[in-house]
Amino acid sequence: DAGVTQSPTHLIKTRGQQVTLRCSPISGHKSVSWYQQVLGQGPQFIFQYYEKEERGRGNFPDRFSARQFPNYSSELNVNALLLGDSALYLCASSFPGQGLYEQYFGPGTRLTVT
Amino acid sequence: TQLLEQSPQFLSIQEGENLTVYCNSSSVFSSLQWYRQEPGEGPVLLVTVVTGGEVKKLKRLTFQFGDARKDSSLHITAAQPGDTGLYLCAGLQAGTALIFGKGTTLSVSS
């Protein structure tokens, strides 16, 4: 079975631009979460979506937004990019209902802001 | 916000040595997970511990959840070069978000 897929793999943007990152969850998983991982740090929670509704939001500015589609895929949008937004953006899918919220991560999108 | 502190931050050992990585918090977590991440890839789930005092073994890896569910440890026996990577602990917060520690970078040389 295919794991979590993310696109693009790498992305270079200029300060002030906008970016959209995409994620497809494991088949059957209905929840998608987004994390930001800065070099040398652990992943930091941005959003969780379940059944197209936002279920959780981390401590990120309103420049960050996301949505989930009927097929459970998801997009993360970041507006007005800053140099500090450079990071690995991870998507994880899970199947809530099993009680443990074990999350399965994709390979990430490496965003570089210049 | 609950925080998870991992130690040590870096560990460099020879093949065949044993090691322990610690994950500590002042808060109680309903469950705690350990992940391993290799450069350029996403974290891969190793284990989930739920019950205080729980011990789980995965081949040469032993995971323990503290009795009070505030801390956890990962012990690797006879480390191999293939164990090299970033080890992350993560606790479930408010039922929706995983709170990660900063990780322990392990390097095993042959």
Image (cartoon, coloured by chain):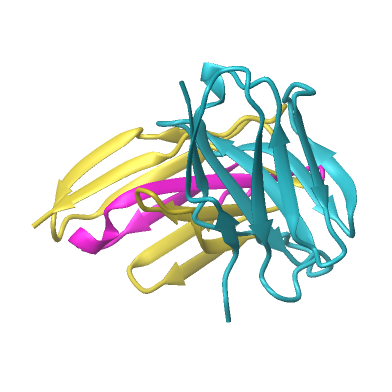
Chain colours: A cyan, B yellow
> From this viewpoint, is residue B68 visible?
no
Residue A29 is situated, as x and y percent measured from the top left of the image, at: 75, 69
User: Within the magenta stretch, is there residue B88?
Assistant: yes
Asked where in the image residue A100 lies, by quadrant, the reply is: bottom right
Front residue of B101/A105: it is A105
Residue drawn at point x = 68 percent, y = 20 percent: A80
Asked where in the image residue A59 lies, by quadrant, the reply is: top right
Residue drawn at point x = 53 percent, y = 61 percent: B45
Residue A51 is situated, as x and y percent measured from the top left of the image, at: 89, 60
User: Within the magenta stretch, is there residue A65?
Assistant: no
Residue A47 is situated, as x and y percent measured from the top left of the image, at: 75, 41
Asked where in the image residue A70 lies, by quadrant, the reply is: bottom right
Residue drawn at point x = 46 percent, y = 49 percent: B73
Front residue of A26/B19: it is A26
Q: Residue furthest left?
A: B110
The region drawn magenta spans B65-94
Residue drawn at point x = 52 percent, y = 46 percent: A109
Check the image and report above or below for B10 versus A83.
below
> From this viewpoint, is residue A43 visible?
yes
Q: Quadrant of the C terminus of chain B?
A: bottom left
Q: Residue furthest bottom?
A: A1
Q: Is residue B95 left or right of residue A22?
A: right
